[in-house]
Image (cartoon, coloured by chain):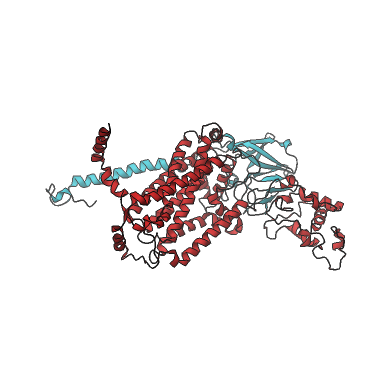
Chain colours: A cyan, B red
Amino acid sequence: MNAPLPSSGKQLCPGGKPPRRAFFRLLTGALGAAATGLLTLPMLGYFFGRRHRPAMWVPMGDLSDFPLNETRTINFDNPLRQPWDGMTSMTGVHVRYQGKNDAGDEQFLVLAANCAHLGCPVSWFPQSGLFMCPCHGGVYYENGERASGPPPRGLFHCVWRVKEGKLEIEAPHYPTLHDTLTESLES
Amino acid sequence: MYQLLRKLAHWIDARAGVSATLWPMMRHPVPRSIDGPMGWWYVFGSASMTFLLIQILTGIGLSMVYVPAADQAYESLLYLDYQQPWGWFLRSLHYYAGSGMVVMLLVHMTQVFLQGSYKYPRELTWVVGVLLLACTMGMFFTGQILRWDTDAYWGLAVGASMAGRVPVLGPEIVHTLLGGDIIGASSLSRFFALHVFIIPGALLTFLGIHLWLVLRCGISAPPKPGEIVDPKTYDATYHEELKRGVPFFGDALLKDIFFSALAVTIVVVIAAVVGPKGPTEPPDPTLAGANPRPEWPFLWLFGLLSLSPPAIETFIMLVFPVLVLGALFFVPFVSNRGERAPSRRPAAVLLVIVIYTTLGVLTYEGVQAPWSPVMDAWSGDPVPVNLVEGRTPLELQGAAVFQFKNCRNCHALEGIGGRRGPDLTTIGASLTRDQLITQISNGTPGGGNMPAYGKQMSPAEMEATVAFLISLRPDGQLPAGAVEDAPVEGTTPQPVELTE
């Protein structure tokens, strides 16, 4: 930056910096900035971009598979998978049929398997009517509400619908405390 | 032939200038006392570097067989363990040399801290050393994920959930960490890139800077009580000392080589005898009973986290590690002058003792993990026979309800079962019938560690369970709250009615 300009020797352009060199410096700076931007933006897009996909629905089974007020654990292959995910894309939800509401619509409770504390898989214990987490002992009641232990909230609810006599759920992503699984319902 | 090689070497050296630049570096003088017995304190840094070299060699070897794809990683680990010649040994050595590297780094840091070597002019050397420790811990965590078994899967889940607690940006961070919506192939590939390219790149860069600083600032002389570090005079004094110094590439290096060779021998023997770590169960998220444990360098944090009240958990997950790292960074800026000898710095010695005791206790708790319920205790651990012998039918019924309602998952009987809640072997001697009913019905007040069982069992089941629990007390001891002169002679457990 502070290197002496050749103008200290033979004066090419009397009275100041040689305009050609000043222009070249400016041009180099501008081109450098442009090159950096052109390189950086796609890289940022690659590393931090989100792939947007339409909501994908996963069939859970016929309505008759779900007796009233009983919790069933359904394992399924999450369609949010990569083709080379192997068995890691398998996931589970806990489904409870709660009968019909006043309008005659079927009511389901679909709870994600991941504990709201730190994501470990909760198991359903029908004998005591509790979900228990093996990691830090979080416990939830059958309706998904927190019963005891460290979880800061109840289990995450999945979005569900009944279509052509079958229960379907929206493919769940890995839930976090802010971004629960029901945002498509809220929006 | 020899002459020809010599000429070739000279030809290259004349152009590359290797002997002109590297040789003086190797022969740089170090304080004379390092040549003596005090020199044994200076061997831990080079031992860490030796382990790093083993990690690079074994890591390159493993990368030639391991497949960083979620559907094949587990199989390739099994292949390494059971089919690839010496694959089991490379996996084992990679694990134990990595562990050895962490141990050597900690010993090295402790020595530098205790002997005040981080003081002027070596503050920056310490700071870069802390970065090296952070990189090494990062390698340990990412390496555990590459061992793509059920522990790796759920370990990553726990890590992602912790990152997800960052305010506002949590979901974005989780998405970036996992490389997608769920834990799967993209997550493994990311951690592979971190473990093989990104963190090693940073680590080697910091190592280069660390070594440059060691050369530039010189190796500190062993501390002498009363020899004060003063930035104004230190350089001149040290320079004088070096005039009487000995070359590093000589006898001083011999101790490093000896110790590194010893350390490598020990690690190779451990690796060969103990064998590779895992993989455990395949990474199938639908397998019940996941119980992820962090690797041993993180067990203390796991213990601290699990023993803390939920209200400050997020702080410990997100802020506390930053504070610890920050505190380490700040060590040379708190005091970079004064005494160096441990005998004149009792606070420093006390600090080291307190820190290692704390780490040791928390690590022990992390190994024991009493906060994790035993998920199959209710069906897998029967009630000890002597606790049901001679009981009334109601009490026997209560024992069955106690098992069936999964109480054992958190409550041990005679030490068997979960340890999340108290062991109930003698509960009848400390809680009355009313207290037991209240405790079981309401759980821990304010939503603590025990769920309210009031709606989870019928009145009859409650009656039986309480009857059983009251009968649980040492022979000859009164039930809790019983009147002193109640009939207790020839005692078998008292019927519930007598306790009223």
Residue B207 visible here: yes
Frontmost residue, A187 versus B278: B278
x, y percent for residue B266: 50, 45
Question: Looking at the image, which residue is at 57% across and 45% down?
Answer: B155
Determine whether, in the image, residue B417 is placed left or right of residue B51: right
x, y percent for residue B481: 80, 65
Residue A187 visible here: no
Q: Number of callouts in the render?
A: 0
Q: Quadrant of residue B8?
A: top left
Frontmost residue, B430 versus B58: B58
x, y percent for residue B383: 77, 49
Classify B185 as above or below B413: above
x, y percent for residue B404: 77, 47
Determine whether, in the image, residue A66 is placed left or right of residue A91: right
Question: Looking at the image, which residue is at 40% across and 53% down?
Answer: B128
Frontmost residue, A118 versus B277: B277
Frontmost residue, A150 versus B376: B376
Classify B6 as above or below A121: above
Determine whether, in the image, residue B55 is placed left or right of residue B363: left
Question: Looking at the image, which residue is at 84% across and 62% down?
Answer: B499
